[in-house]
Image (cartoon, rainbow, N blue to C red):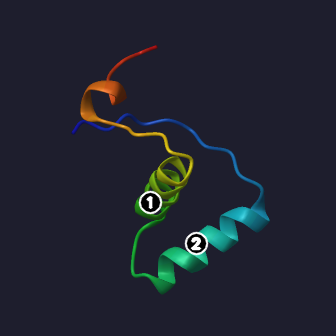
Amino acid sequence: MDKAAFALRLDPVRLTAIRRRADAELRGMNAQIEILLREDLTRRGIRVTEDRENDPT
């Protein structure tokens, strides 16, 4: 799976919270954000497949 780079602006409080969770789970920030996004999509019933990820619509 190819990954696209993009800028993400977060307020310092959320950034610190994500950094602490990433450290506690021995992950990098990018990996932690990706996991949080994946968990939220799953919780909302949004199924993402490889084909949908590459679909610009």
Q: Is residue 18 above or below residue 41?
A: below
Residue at (36% x, 18% y) in the render: 55
Q: Position of residue 47 (x, y in %)?
A: 40, 40
Residue drawn at 24 percent across, 36 percent down: 2
Residue at the limit of the structure toward the left, as seen here: 1
- Tag 2 secondary structure: helix
Q: In the rendered image of this protein, does residue 56 appear above or below residue 51?
A: above
Q: Which residue is mark 2?
A: 19
Residue that extends furthest to the top in the rendered view of this protein: 57
Q: Which residue is mark 1?
A: 35
Please name the residue shown 60% across and 68% down the image. Answer: 18
Toward the viewer: 55 or 3?
Answer: 55
Q: Position of residue 50 (x, y in %)?
A: 26, 33
Task: Reply above or below: 1 against 42.
Answer: above
Q: Report whether 57 appears left or right of 9.
A: left
Choose the circle earlier in sequence order: 2 or 1. 2
The reply, left or right, for residue 54 in relation to residue 25 is: left
Mark 2 crowd level (few <14, some 14–19, many ≥20, 10 Å Cα): some
* Marker disc for residue 53: none
Mark 2 residue type: Arg
